[in-house]
Image (cartoon, rainbow, N blue to C red):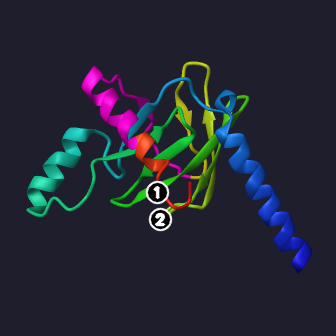
Amino acid sequence: MRMKLILSVLSFALFLVACGDPSNTLDHSERHVRVAEPFDTYGACERAQKDSGEGLFNCYQSIELCSNGGVDIVVTDIINEGLYRIDDDRLHVEIMSPGDIPSTLEIERAADGTLQTPGLPSKNPWTQQTLNAEEQKRLDEGCAAMEGRDWW
């Protein structure tokens, strides 16, 4: 039991060290989005929100990958924050805040930058957003703020 705990702590420490290595993260922060199921388009989701009169659900899911190794994933209305590292075409994600997705996740990254999330299946594809300078600045500020979290 004690050996298992020591191995768990050691592997987590190695994960954190790898995340801190800039060669294991993206060169710049990115935001990827997809339309939330069961909708096929953002417009269909917006219409459903208006028809419900409540507007209590997200029309988009998002993944923000930070150049500092932080990650922010939203699939419902809960922000799941953590750390990632890149190994070839895979991102290994460790969610550090309590959330609504698995605590570890593999994200596949194609040569064109598109993402596949087998652990978060959906019929809708992830699309990288093109951010203007102000949006990129806000994303980078949010990424930097993660470094102040207790779990960082």
Count of number-bearing discs:
2
Nearer to the camera, 54 or 52: 54
- Pinpoint residue 126: horizontal percent, then vertical percent: 45, 35
* Whether residue 91 can be seen here: no
- Pinpoint residue 4: horizontal percent, then vertical percent: 87, 72
* Whether residue 67 can be seen here: yes
Q: Secondary structure at mark 1?
A: strand
- Pinpoint residue 56: horizontal percent, then vertical percent: 20, 62
- Look at the picture and state if 136 lies above or below 146: above
Q: Which residue, as the protein is rendered here, is positioned at the far bottom? A: 1
- Pinpoint residue 75: horizontal percent, then vertical percent: 41, 54
Q: Which residues are magenta?
A: 120-142
Q: Which residue is mark 1?
A: 80
Q: Residues within 10 Å of mark 2 (few under 14, many from 20)?
A: some
Q: Are circles 2 and 1 on residues that touch, CB within 8 Å?
A: yes
Q: Secondary structure at mark 2?
A: loop
Nearer to the camera, 48 or 26: 26
In the image, taking residue 39 as reference, residue 148 lies left or right, namely right
Nearer to the camera, 66 or 123: 66
Residue at image point 68% right, 27% down = 23
Q: Which residue is mark 2?
A: 99
Q: Amino acid at mark 1?
A: Asn
Residue at image point 44% right, 41% down = 144
Q: Quadrant of the C terminus?
A: bottom right
- Look at the picture and state if 37 lies above or below 133: below
